[in-house]
Image (spheres, coloured by chain):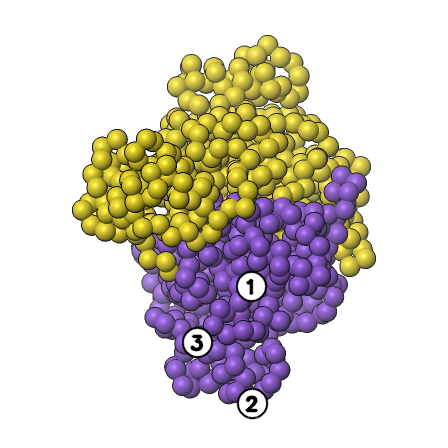
Chain colours: A purple, B yellow
Amino acid sequence: MISRVLSAELSEHAGRRVTIAGWVHRRRHLKTVSFLVVRDRAGLAQVVAGETHDGAGGGLPGEESVVRVTGTVIRRPQAPGGVELAEPEIEVLAEPGTPPPFDLYRPVVTASLPTVLDHAPVALRHPRLRAALEISAASVAGFRAALDRLGFTEIHTPKIVASATESGANVFGIDYFGRPAYLAQSPQFYKQAMVGVFERVYEVGPVFRAEPHDTVRHLAQYTSLDAELGFVTDHRDVMAVLREAVAGMVESVRHRAAAAAGLLGVALPEVPAEIPAVHFTEAQRLTSSSEPDLAPAQERWLSEWALREHGSEFLFVTGYPMSKRPFYTHPDPARPGSSNGFDLLFRGLELVTGGQRLHRYEDYTSALAALGEPIGPYEGYLQAFRYGMPPHGGFALGLERWTARLTGAANIRETTAFPRDLHRLSP
Amino acid sequence: MISRVLSAELSEHAGRRVTIAGWVHRRRHLKTVSFLVVRDRAGLAQVVAGETHDGAGGGLPGEESVVRVTGTVIRRPQAPGGVELAEPEIEVLAEPGTPPPFDLYRPVVTASLPTVLDHAPVALRHPRLRAALEISAASVAGFRAALDRLGFTEIHTPKIVASATESGANVFGIDYFGRPAYLAQSPQFYKQAMVGVFERVYEVGPVFRAEPHDTVRHLAQYTSLDAELGFVTDHRDVMAVLREAVAGMVESVRHRAAAAAGLLGVALPEVPAEIPAVHFTEAQRLTSSSEPDLAPAQERWLSEWALREHGSEFLFVTGYPMSKRPFYTHPDPARPGSSNGFDLLFRGLELVTGGQRLHRYEDYTSALAALGEPIGPYEGYLQAFRYGMPPHGGFALGLERWTARLTGAANIRETTAFPRDLHRLSP
């Protein structure tokens, strides 16, 4: 390994001669002195080139050059980290052929979103753009850690499926050895089947939606955080687990991505020990609506209400009408027409959909018959229920949507490295 | 949550009346007494039905019924866990409509592999089949933990790509909003680009190969454990990181999947502090071969040799000929024709492929020109190198292949829940 210390560790080496390595984040020429700011995975380090280079600094490598710099660590309060490297010997490991499409060293991103996305491999080096992905990675780690603690097992399920069952439309077709197949829109059926094996399972993986609309909220591929658990009494047990998962995500961002969260000014939410919940009919009453679903404006209003009334940035809406939930949703035995399905709203937007599922084979065949759907395409799915399944439920959380809510990103495309949408298939 | 104790915790409750829940793993009728063995996520628990049920035990629920059983915990050395539940009250939560296609309670799986795969949702409940997936989950957790400790960041990259670049053949085509697209065969280009952002990255995700051969070693979708890191001196730094990742996987199986490993009689390998390595030319000499690649029989021979000579079940083969490695492989500067690419053999089989990559833009354009390949389809990929990339390398490990080696599975289809292959697209 190229022997080096990281930028963030420099202050521990004051007075010593050390080597750092990274990218030239910025080259600055003053009258009698020149500076290099070197960026590595841990942050920034300032190198003062002094007069060892030719006065105007013309000999210093340009931005995005990959360098190894050996120098003496000097305390300098105004430098990043309170130290700088003096009397540098600079070795260029790789030279860029082209300057970046925008200045990576400016505190804000000056390029338009299409420019950023077209040049993702270099644009993501900008500390603010990178920060969103760090927060995303920390969130996933927290999700897994929370569920691991609760006895969940991680699974990996097929992304290529035989039938376009779950929502019919918006699936991508594949040529599968000459047969038609589809990209999975969710691991729903598989995670339910695996409750029969492990009782509690989760999967973090890509899901695919042939979303024909070009919006700031939709991607053709996103990362779904899915969980499913058996032996629940009803959907409230699922909500309790979801609360733990979200709390784990927040804690992980706090600990693993503190600098990134700080850079983006992320205000981490408090996750109440019990997240407040309103029944759908109450949500309708509060928003003076009689529609069978919540419009975005109502979700925003309810979020504000929850913050005002309960001091919570999270709000469960329970008891959605059966007519608006997928066929595998368990009805509320006490309220005809209502389901044991819920949404979790976070900062004005639906973040998670979940609920209790049907668990008896006959209930599935009845539900499909009521929809006029044939059993055939669901045979593989229904197998699990033929052989005895406990009451169970689960949820799915879109990672990019979570990161967008947390960072305040206006467009979900800012929260994933290489977005896919109606128009974008590269890089 | 249905209030219950897990089977594995029963012995802590001796003398008390407790509730368990799970599946009827086995129902046994003896002359004067009947037993239920209940299976939950933690193991098995024995329930003695005595004469509270009708003598012949006819009133007891059948195999795979989902039950909740309240009973008194009695010490009984010959029962699983040394305790059993007496004076049971049994509640059936769900009844199977069909008996399983084979007996799940027999110690070995009596069904053929096609029967197992056709009935995966119920077959995987068999403790031996489930065990392989537990080992797989524990391995992934260990991989992530090891790389997290080394400062790696987790990434999620596109599974839908614009061109079939990496190997040309064996890609699945997609209809992407009316345009042709392909399923990604690996995250290779994306993980390299992300070295420019995070220096050290990993991804655990599905990759897709339209493998037209029906073998015991190939799947159309498998889970790839990918890592890539910058600021390496050469491939040996990559090998050192891979050693840590594999050691983390072994340790995690030891701690998180001990029961599963025990059930399958898995002998966990020792991972030497430094895994022995032979150069390709030496491997040729040892196996008296002059072919430019290693045949399976040679890999087996070399593995046995490493065990004999070095006491290691792992062996690196380094310096593969450039002609046999992908175009992005870094040549060995000291040996014309040799690469800085390596394989890791484990128990007779190639488990990991990795190496140092090219990092200069001109080296990529030259390599593509030498192959007679146009630059066009690689434009997005090559972007990263235009803007300055450090010396870097990485590796990819197939999760199912690893689990198969560890468990001794004869067919890789036994190591994934719902395999996809030339003929199989469901369940």
Q: Are marks 2 and 3 on the same chain?
A: yes
Residue type, label 1:
Thr
- Disc 3 designates what residue? A277
Residue type, label 3:
Ala
Residue found 37% across the figure and 34% down from its top: B29
- Disc 2 designates what residue? A288
Residue extending farthest to the left is B15
Residue type, label 2:
Ser
**Whole-Å distance between the Cαs marked 2 and 3?**
18 Å
Residue extending farthest to the bottom is A288
Note whether B87 is above or below A242 in the view shown. Answer: above
Residue found 59% across the figure and 16% down from its top: B297
Looking at the rendered structure, the secondary structure element under dot 2 is loop
Residue A201 in percent (x, y) is at: 47, 51
Note whether B9 is above or below B290 in the view shown. Answer: below
Q: Nearer the viewer, residue A131 or A97?
A: A131
Residue A166 in percent (x, y) is at: 65, 58
Is the Cβ of the residue at disc 2 closer than 8 Å to that at disc 3? Answer: no
Residue B102 in percent (x, y) is at: 52, 33
What's the chain of the residue with tag 1? A
Label whose residue precedes the other's in the sequence (1 or 3)? 3
Label whose residue precedes the other's in the sequence (1 or 2)? 2
- Disc 1 designates what residue? A329
Q: Quadrant of residue B293?
A: top right
Residue B278 in percent (x, y) is at: 51, 21
Closer to the observer: label 1 or label 3? 1
